Each structure stands twice: as C-alpha cells, then as structure tokens.
Image: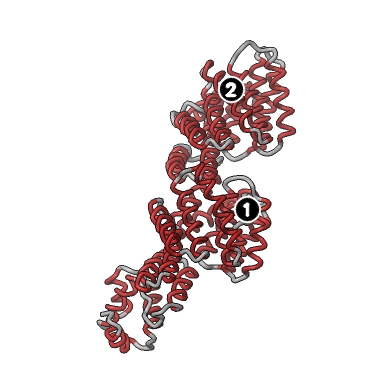
Amino acid sequence: MSRVDRLDQGRKAYAKHEWRDAYAFLSFADLETPLGGVDLAMLAESAFLLGSETRSLEILERAYHLNTTGELPSTAARFAFWIGFRLQLAGDGTLGEVWHSRARRHLEECAPCAAHGLPFLARGCSLMVAGDASAAHVQFAKAFDIGTRYGDHDLTALARHYQGRAKLRSGQIAQGMAFLDESVAAISTGASSSVVTGGIFCSALDACDEAMDIRRADRWTSAFRQWRVTQPSMIAFRTEALAHRVSLMLLRGAWRDALDELTTLIQWLDERSDRPAAGLAYYQRGELHRLRGEHDAAHAAYLEALKRGHKPQPGLAQLLLAQGEIESAAEETRRLLAQTTLQPNRSRVLLASVEILLAAGDVSDARACAEELSELDAKLRTPLSYATITHAIGAVLLCEDKPQPSLVALRDAMTTWNEIGARYQAARARVLIAAAHRELGDEAAVKSELTAAAQSFDVLGAAADRLHAEEFYRRGANADDPFLTARQLDVLRLLALGMSNLAISESLALSAQAVAKDVTSVFYQLRVLTREEVAKKARDRGLL
C-alpha cells in the first residue's frame, strides 16, 4: 500500500471514529513522509483516544512547531492552546500557562477568528482554580460569544459547559445545571470532536456529584455509555465512565455487578500503571466490602487505594466505627471536617460524621454537621440531597430524645431513598424508624420495620447490617419472638411440610446457598436443632 493510500485510509478511519485504524494508517504514512498540520492533529487526537496522552502531546508539539513557520498563526495558536489546556487539566498549570502565552502571541498576528476565544477559556479555567468563579464565568461567556459568532462547536460547547461549572461553584445551582444541560445537548448532536465530547461528559458527571443530582447522573451516564459504544476502539474516558457507573451501582444496591466491574477495571488499570485511577477504583471496592460487612477486605482495599495516592475517606473512618473503634473513628472524623471543604467530598464527610459523632455521644457536633447539610440542601434541592439531610436530621432528633419528629424526618428520608432506588440507605432509615417506634413503645411497629429492613439487607448481602437489625430486635420487649423475614417464613412453611432443601430451592426459585442460609436462620430463631422440631415450634408460636 502506498503512502497516499495509507493517508487516505487513515483519514477515512478518523472520519468514522475508528481510532485504532486511524492511528495505525496515519503513523505509517508519517514514517514515510512527515505529516502536515491537519493530519498531525488527527494523529494526535487518535493517540489520545487510544489512551496515550504522552504520545498525543508529543504529536501536538510537532504540529505546533510545524505551523510556527507557516502563514496561519491561528493554527499555531490552536495547537499551543490545546497543549496548554491539556497540561492545565492534568494539574501542571505553570507549564500550561507557558503554552497559553505562546497562543496569545500568535493571536496578536491574526485577524478576528474563533481562535481568539481560546485565551478566554484558558483564563477562565485559571480563575476557577484560583477560586474566583464569578470572574471565571465572565471569561467563559466571552469565549462562548466568540465561538457562536464563528460557528466553532468545540469552543461553544466547552465555554457553555464551564459557565455551568462556574455557576455551580458560585452556589447558583439551577443556573449552573441549565448551562450543563445546554452543553450536553450540544455534544449529543455529534458536532463536537470526540476529545471535547468525552471531556464534557466526564466533567458533567463530576458536576452531578457536586450538585447531588442523581437524575441527571442517570441520564448522562446512560448517554455517555451509548456514545462510547459507537467507538469500540476508544480507551480514553473508560475509567471515568466506569467509575461513575459503579457509583450508581453502589447507591442502587447492584453490588455484585459493581464488584465484577471493579475487578475488571482494577486489573486493567494496574496493567497500565494508572495509579490515580486505580486508587479511586480500590476505594470503591473498599466501600463495597464495607457495606457488605467484609471488614478485612475493606481495609485491604482502602490500603491499596492509599498506596496509589487516593485518600480512603470517609470510608476508612466509617470502617473504624463498624469495627467498634468509636473514639478512633470520631477523631478521624473531626480531622476530616477540618480539612475537607469542597463538594462533593464535604457532603460525604458530613453525612458520615453525623453517624460517627452520634455513636461517640457528641450530639451537639452531630447536629452542627446535620445543620450544615441542611444549608446545602437549601441550595441543591435534589431528591438525593433531601434524603441525605432528612436522614441525618432524623438520626440527630432520635438521639435528642425526640422520637416523634425523628419519625417524621426518617419516614421522609426512607420514602425519598426508595424513590431514587437507594435500597441500602432506605433499609438503614427503617432501622432508625424502628428505634423511634421503640422509644414510643410500639413494639409491633418495631418488628415490622426491622423485618422489612432485614429482608432488604439479605437481598443486598449486607450481612453486618442484617445482624445489627436482629440484635436490636432482641433487646426489645418481645425478645423471645422469632425474627424472620418474609422469605424465611416461606422457607419455614415448606420445612414444616417436610420438604428437603433441594425441593424448597426449586419451589421458591432460590439458590441452594440461599436456602441453606435461611434454614440455618430458621433453626436459630426458633431455637431448634432438628427439622422434626420445626413444625411443632412454629405452630406453638402461631407462625403456621
């Protein structure tokens, strides 16, 4: 195949978003005779989308130097801007500014064009890092106006997106999310480059975390995944896409699927020596193990996250609480509260702090955390923020010996958790509701709530929470009553008929392991040792 053919094939592959082929053909053509600026830009984008950030920057630098001697300074300015912008996003603001200065110098030689909007975008991002979101928004607005005037889809989409992020940082949540809606709609048309499209999707999902907006997160995660499916050779953005999907899985209780995703992702990241991304994945694995009551596995995962530079908090503090090290957990929590200021980490720390400080008996500080969450909810006004604050307030009221208002708040929390599909959090709210009912002397309601919570914990695999619910029930007035979930009652009835575990498994469409676990629980709850005793004891207790 001749160089002309390879170049033609590379350009066609690029147009069809076949990044592996585009990179291969363009690279071969470049070996024979160095590519020009436009083709180098295609090669650089293909390298980036195949996960080679360093190689992509090297190619962009070649393209820049090639164009510094040309007659189109605006092209050199564009290459300089993108190099600086990528360095800026990677955290090297100093070197990024060097490249942005070069871009501005080239633009001084240019007639008015879309490239003149790029410095405003760069300046806005620098102001965001410096904490001046209002001034940043002004810069992004100027970039948007120039991009609109000259029909530059990448510039307008990025400028609109960062206007949204600036508004969020300024506390103008509704306006910020509206700007983000507009930017996501813009990239969904396919008019923007893949690098810009993927970057905006990732940043928009980060914004959803910041704004606790689960509904947009659902919608945009799905759109992001569908977009990535159309480009199967693309490696860039894989980590971000999976991390956001796993977060939703953890919230929604799809823990087995989340563990499968994380196992595959961690292996892939470790093979690529991507330490920061692997650190986040290990932290998510630690959270999953902690929720399942697998404390040793959780601790090991948190340590792996720390080795890779990701601070395993507030999960590690919550793990200390689960292990009974209350004072250590409270001390860690107070340190986190002093150090964590930005969303979404601040709200996560606050919610964990309420539970830990209440366990440590520090009700006043727990209330202060809950009140700060309440102020946050007044700004965000999303179902997730509302469920979070009402859950926290309900727990505090319960410890302040105010069971009736606590019950109202916790029922609101449970309802909202259920509405957004957060089954684990809803079950945890039920346990607190049961505690409020106990304070009010309603043991029948206690049993009803705890039974429902235990059933959810069983389905999720939250063994420690299931045991806690049972132990809490045993401390009540009717401690001798068996504590059985609806599924365990079904197993009990079939046991009483003399059915084997295999027959029960087939009848209830349950796994053999699930039936064996439920049979063991039935024996324990009824205080019997043989199947022959089950029917008699169950009838005596009025369970049949």
In depth, the one of 445 and 260 nearer the eye is 445
Residue type highlighted by circle 1: Gly
Q: Residue at x 59, y 40 (%)?
A: 51
Q: Residue at x 55, y 23 (%)?
A: 144
Q: Is residue 520 visible?
A: no
Q: Give residue 371's position: percent from left, percent from top.
A: 55, 52
In this picture, residue 27 sits left or right of residue 463: right
Q: Residues within 10 Å of mark 1 (few under 14, many from 20)?
A: many
Q: Give residue 8's position: percent from left, percent from top.
A: 53, 24
In this picture, residue 341 sits left or right of residue 405: right
Q: Give residue 156's position: percent from left, percent from top.
A: 53, 24
- Marks 1 and 2: which is nearer the front? 2
* Count of numbered labels shown in the rendering: 2
Q: Is residue 489 visible?
A: yes
* Up-down relation of residue 133 to residue 359 (above or below): above
Task: Tell me the SS state at disc 1.
Answer: helix
In depth, the one of 429 and 228 nearer the eye is 429
Task: Tell me the SS state at disc 2.
Answer: helix
Residue 158 quadrant: top right
Residue type highlighted by circle 2: Ala
* Up-down relation of residue 75 to residue 265 (above or below): above
* Up-down relation of residue 291 to residue 163 (above or below): below
What residue is disc 2 on?
143
Q: Residue at x 64, y 31 (%)?
A: 125
Circles 1 and 2: CB distance less than 8 Å? no
Instruction: Give the residue at the far top of this rendering.
Output: 111
Q: Residues within 10 Å of mark 2 (few under 14, many from 20)?
A: many
Tag 2 or tag 1, which sits nearer the N-term?
Answer: 2
Residue 279 badge: 1
Q: Give residue 67's position: percent from left, percent from top.
A: 68, 19
